[in-house]
Image: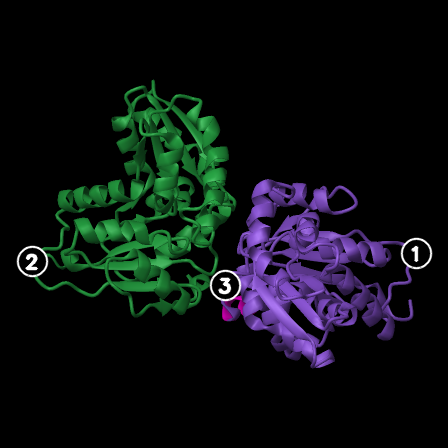
Chain colours: A green, B purple
Amino acid sequence: MNDPEKYAPVGVFDSGVGGLTVVREIMNLLPDEQVVYFGDTARVPYGSKSGETVTKFSRQDVKFLLGMHVKAVVAACNTASAVALDEIEKEISVPIIGVVRPGARAAAEATRKKKVGVIATEATIHSEIYTKYIQGIDSDTKVIGKACPLFVPLVEEGLLNDPVTDEIARRYLGELKGTGIDTLILGCTHYPLLKDTIARTMGEDVTLVNPAYETARSLKKLLTEKGLLNSSDTIAKHRFFVSDSVDKFLSFASAILPYEITSAERINIEEY
Amino acid sequence: MNDPEKYAPVGVFDSGVGGLTVVREIMNLLPDEQVVYFGDTARVPYGSKSGETVTKFSRQDVKFLLGMHVKAVVAACNTASAVALDEIEKEISVPIIGVVRPGARAAAEATRKKKVGVIATEATIHSEIYTKYIQGIDSDTKVIGKACPLFVPLVEEGLLNDPVTDEIARRYLGELKGTGIDTLILGCTHYPLLKDTIARTMGEDVTLVNPAYETARSLKKLLTEKGLLNSSDTIAKHRFFVSDSVDKFLSFASAILPYEITSAERINIEEY
């Protein structure tokens, strides 16, 4: 082994289970990488809380992952990426990427009318970070945000294809439709699970951007550039950590990931 | 002052803002008592989390209140009352009451057909504590529980009287209606805000029990029996503490309480 850092795992954290949609994309695109995941299931959600609290929690999440000797950190939570990433990036020596910047880049490239919509949690919309990043790429692009607080509870209640979810989607997305956007960022990890409902409501002329997929691509680029891609023949086992009950996590994780997750460990995140 | 303990405040805690519905009843029934409130807004909700996590959080909440030299503690959160109270009661010397026992007693007295329904969070329903308390009073009474996870997000989105909330209420309450209950406990602090929808859905033959009101009555009884009622002419100012942003709390608090709340303090609950 010339460079043992290559063989270190990639750390991924989220406010809960939604970040597993990002892990799924990483597993698809980078099958040789080992993932260490932390889901803050005891303090979920982050999206309705203040920037100060989300930053404090995210800092603890990152500190835990650094203790696991990860070679890079992925903030798989849109809210954490939106409000905490810039600050935490300055404090650590390991590279860290979030889901917002890759999603913003993909949307800026996809829009033809230079009008992009963003749906996300209250905290993410309030941060206006998607606007900042998209206009940093093309200052002529207009960005219209809309918080959709009921989407996460509807997903967690399993109402993925349901008249109630259709009605809520019509209300949330109605005003976005009227603005003439041609691209819509699904700015919360749960929202890709409502892709069918959102696509039906917005119509086929609107391109949906899934930051989870874009983030896996960014991670691959980052690891390649830094010479950190794992080239080992043996794949280390992925590891999953949560701050609340392991049992509840396992069933959700197994539904999202391409294989059944049989073990996870509970940690006390408040000690970090 | 013969007994300075009388002049100590009453401590009330909740997972967030919902417990203010209990504070409102305490202010109505016991206008001479000073209230110290703590809302764990950084870690809300409790109702979807494990008993172990809820107990740990509740223990920290109580420890903070004890540091404020309260003469009694009220767990204004159904979930905390359901899963953590019995354990915490053994650990502290100050009397503590929850919202579950008073609600259970009122329901046991109200039912004529000996069939009581309970709607609450997943954690409260899973604990089966309402069943335990009601059958402890009358072992012949049947208790049927139903978790309603979407009710809290619907209330927080302001959809108090809305066709979507009506539809969700029909689904949650449909199976309860078919069981022939004549009494229904609103076993989560947010649910009294949906009283109209719930009453309309259940029909006029079903009596709704609001544990918040029953809890204020229990507190009055407790303070009277222990000689702890405040008989002072001067009313000390109520104090409000939260673990997340103060601003967001103030507007919600002012909407629920009979007067405008202009100040609250933020604390780091993880230090307790």
Gap in Å between the C-alphas at discs 3 and 1?
Answer: 43 Å
> Residue A259 vs residue A174: left or right?
left
Residue named by callout 2: A2
Task: Determine the residue positioned at 55% across, 54% down.
Answer: B171
Quote the CA–CA distance across marks 1 and 2. Answer: 79 Å
Ranked by sequence position, the earlier of labels 3 and 1 is 3
* Quarter of the rendering occupied by the C terminus of chain A: bottom left
Instruction: Judge if badges 1 and 2 mark residues of a common chain.
Output: no
Q: What amino acid is at disc 1?
A: Asp
The front one of B154 and B167 is B167
Q: Do the residues labelled 3 and 2 touch (CB within 8 Å)?
A: no
Q: What is the x, y in percent for residue B31? A: 85, 55
Percent x, y of residue A128: 43, 32
Reading the image, the residue beneath label 1 is B233
Q: Distance from label 3 to label 2 (Cα)?
A: 45 Å
**Which numbered mark, 3 or 1, is in the foreground of this view?**
3
Magenta stretch bounds? B52-56
Residue A140 lies left or right of residue A47; in this view the side is left
* Amino acid under disc 3: Lys
Which residue in the protein does label 3 denote?
A: B49
Quarter holding the N terminus of chain A is bottom left
Instruction: Check disc 1 and report its element: helix, strand or loop.
Output: loop
Contact? badges 3 and 1 (CB < 8 Å)? no
Q: Residues within 10 Å of mark 1 (few under 14, many from 20)?
A: few
The residue closer to the viewer here, B10 or B104, is B104
User: Is residue A33 found left or right of A181 in the rendered image?
Assistant: left
Q: Which of marks 3 and 2 is in front?
A: 3
Which residue type carries mark 2? Asn
Q: How crowded is mark 2: few (under 14 residues within 10 Å), some or many (20 or more)?
A: few
Verify whether residue B54 appears in magenta: yes
Q: Is residue B12 left or right of residue A195?
A: right
